[in-house]
C-alpha cells in the first residue's frame, strides 16, 4: 500500500477518534512530533524534581516534609510513565537521557528558575502544577494511546499537587506580615513564568495546526493560557493576594480576563539556556546519571552471574541424566 | 553464558519495525524492559498498566510497586520481560477477525422468540 493511501486511512482514524497504538502505521512526522513532545514532557517531570528537592530537608514541619516527598516521588513516577510511552515509538530510554544530557532535548523552562523561599513550594504547586494540569487534561484525550493513558494516570495524581500548594499559600496568607509578604513575593516571581509554560502565542507556534489536526493537541497555547488566567484571577482572591499584572481586568464583553503582554524575550532567553538555573539543573542530572553508572553495571553483572550459574546447573543436570558408558 | 540483551519494544511491537535491533551507536546495555500487570483487587483480572526497566524479575516487581501502586492500586503484581510477549499483527487483523464477523447467530439476540417467554 502506498504512503498516500496509508496517510488518508491514518487521518480518517484520527477524525473518528480511534486511538493510534504503537504497532499501527503512522506518518514519520507524527512519530517524530510525539517522540519530541513526550520525551520533553518526561524530562520536565524529572528536572521538575530538582527545584522542590531543594526544600525537602527544610520543610517547616514533618507533615509538609512527608507531603513534599510524596509529591517529588510522584514526579519521578510521572517521568517514568512518560519515558515508557516514548519508548513505544521506537526510541530507547538511554537515547532520551542522552538527548537531555547533551542539551539537545529541552524541558519546561519553568524549572530553570530558583526556589528562594518556602512560599515557592506553594506557588509551584498552585501555579506551575496548575498550568501543567491545564495542559495535561486535554492530553489525556490525545490520539496516541500510550501517551493518553499515561496522562490519565498523571492527571489523577497531580490534583493533590496543586491543592497542597494552594494550602501552603493559604496558610502563609493567614500568617504574620513577613509570611504574607513571602507569599506575595513567591506569586510575583512565579506568575509570569507560569504563563509562559503554555508556550509561544498561536501566531508564533508553527506546529500547532498540524498537532491539532492529528489531535495531539486539542486546544491552542493561547486558549489554554486564557483559561488558566481566568481561573487564577478568581483563585487568588481566596489568598487576599494579587497577581503581578496591572493590566489584569475582567472583560465583560469577552467574558474573559484581559491580561498584560508576556515578555517573550525572557522566554526565549531561558529556552536557549540562559535562565538563572539552566546550567545547574543540567549539571545535576548529568552528575546523577554518571554517579549511577556503577549501580546499573553492577545490576547487570549480577544478572549475568546468575544466568551463568543457571546455565552450569542446567548443563550438569543434563549430563547426569545421560546414560553411562 | 552471557545472554545478549537486545532492545525489544513494549507490548505488541514484536519483530516488525526492526523491533529487536539495538539502537545504532549505543554501546552500553540497557536494563531489559518489563511489562507490568496489576490486579486491582481480589476477584479481578490482572490488567496491563505499563512498562519499566529492571535488571531482573525481583527488581521489576519492586519498581512496579513504586511506579504503579503508590496509591493502593493493586493487591498483586505480575511482571514479564517484554521480549516474551507475542502479539498479533495489526496488518493481518482483517484476515484474523473477519471470520467472526458474519456469525451473528452466536449472539442471543439473533433468535426471534415470543416476548411472553420468560426466564430465557
Image: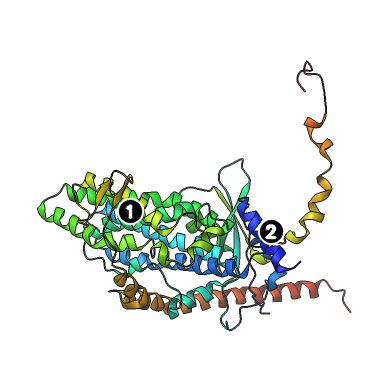
Q: Residue furthest top?
A: B116
Residue drawn where x is 81% and y is 46% of the image = B100
Asked whether residue B67 is in view, the answer is yes
Marks 2, 1 in one chain: yes
**Gap in angstroms between the C-alphas marked 2 and 1:** 47 Å
Q: Residue furthest front?
A: A253
Can the viewer see residue A24 in this picture?
no
B52 or A203, which is in the foreground? A203
Image check: A227 left or right of A178? Answer: right
Q: Quadrant of the C terminus of chain B?
A: top right
Mark 1 residue element: helix
Which quadrant: the N terminus of chain B? bottom right
**Residue at the outermost right position:** A325
Mark 1 lies on residue: A67
The residue lying at 58 percent from left, 58 percent from top is A144
| Vertical placement of residue B105 versus B52, above or below | above
- Label tally: 2
**Seen in the image, is A146 located left or right of residue A264?**
right
Residue A111, given in percent of the width and then of the height, sits at 34, 67
Q: Earlier in the sequence, mark 2 or mark 1?
A: 2
- Mark 2 packing: few (<14 Cα in 10 Å), some, or many (20+)? some
Relative height, residue B105 to residue A290 (above, below): above
Quadrant of residue A68 within the rendered picture: bottom left
Q: Which residue is mark 2?
A: A9
Q: Position of residue A228 (x, y in %)?
A: 34, 52
Callout 2 secondary element: helix
Front-lying residue, A172 or A242: A242
Amino acid at each position: 500500500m502506498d504512503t498516500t493511501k496509508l496517510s488518508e486511512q491514518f487521518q480518517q482514524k484520527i477524525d473518528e477518534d480511534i486511538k493510534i497504538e504503537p504497532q499501527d502505521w503512522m506518518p514519520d512526522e507524527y512519530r517524530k512530533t510525539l517522540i519530541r513532545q513526550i520525551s520533553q514532557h518526561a524530562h520536565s517531570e524529572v528536572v521538575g524534581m530538582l527545584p522542590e528537592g531543594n526544600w525537602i530537608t527544610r520543610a517547616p514541619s514533618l507533615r509538609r516534609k512527608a507531603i513534599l516527598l510524596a509529591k517529588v516521588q510522584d514526579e519521578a513516577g510521572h517521568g517514568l510513565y512518560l519515558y515508557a510511552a516514548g519508548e513505544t515509538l521506537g526510541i530507547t530510554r538511554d537515547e532520551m537521557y542522552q538527548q537531555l544530557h547533551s542539551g539537545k532535548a529541552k524541558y519546561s523552562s519553568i524549572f530553570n528558575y530558583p526556589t528562594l523561599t518556602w512560599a515557592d513550594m506553594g506557588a509551584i504547586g498552585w501555579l506551575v502544577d496548575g498550568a501543567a494540569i491545564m495542559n495535561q487534561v486535554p492530553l489525556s484525550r490525545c490520539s496516541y494511546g500510550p501517551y493518553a493513558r499515561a496522562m490519565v494516570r498523571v492527571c489523577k495524581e497531580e490534583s493533590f499537587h496543586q491543592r497542597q500548594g494552594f494550602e501552603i499559600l493559604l496558610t502563609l496568607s493567614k500568617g504574620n506580615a513577613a509570611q504574607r509578604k513571602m507569599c506575595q513575593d513567591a506569586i510575583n516571581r512565579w506568575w509570569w513564568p507560569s504563563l509562559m509554560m503554555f508556550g509561544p502565542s498561536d501566531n508564533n507556534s508553527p506546529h500547532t495546526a498540524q498537532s491539532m489536526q492529528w489531535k495531539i493537541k486539542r486546544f491552542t497555547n493561547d486558549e489554554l493560557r486564557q483559561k488558566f488566567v481566568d481561573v487564577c484571577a478568581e483563585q487568588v482572591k481566596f489568598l487576599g493576594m494579587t497577581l503581578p499584572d496591572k493590566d489584569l481586568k475582567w472583560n465583560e464583553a469577552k467574558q474573559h480576563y484581559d491580561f498584560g503582554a508576556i515578555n517573550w524575550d525572557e522566554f526565549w532567553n531561558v529556552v536557549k539556556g540562559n535562565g538563572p538555573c539552566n546550567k545547574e539543573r543540567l549539571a545535576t542530572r548529568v552528575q546523577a546519571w554518571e554517579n549511577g553508572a556503577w549501580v546499573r553495571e553492577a545490576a547487570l553483572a549480577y544478572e549475568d552471574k546468575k544466568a551463568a550459574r543457571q546455565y552450569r546447573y542446567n548443563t550438569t543436570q543434563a549430563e547426569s541424566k545421560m546414560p553411562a558408558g | 553464558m552471557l545472554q545478549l540483551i537486545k532492545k525489544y519494544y513494549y507490548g505488541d511491537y514484536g519483530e516488525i519495525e526492526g523491533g529487536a535491533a539495538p539502537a545504532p551507536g549505543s554501546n552500553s546495555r540497557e536494563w531489559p524492559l518489563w511489562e507490568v500487570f496489576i490486579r486491582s483487587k481480589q476477584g479481578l483480572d490482572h490488567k496491563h498498566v505499563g512498562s519499566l526497566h529492571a535488571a531482573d524479575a525481583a527488581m521489576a516487581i519492586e519498581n512496579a510497586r513504586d511506579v504503579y501502586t503508590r496509591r493502593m492500586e493493586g493487591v498483586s503484581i505480575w511482571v514479564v520481560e517484554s521480549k516474551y510477549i507475542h502479539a498479533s499483527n495489526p496488518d493481518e487483523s482483517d484476515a484474523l477477525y473477519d471470520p467472526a464477523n458474519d456469525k451473528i447467530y452466536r449472539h442471543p439476540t439473533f433468535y426471534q422468540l415470543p416476548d411472553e417467554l420468560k426466564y430465557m
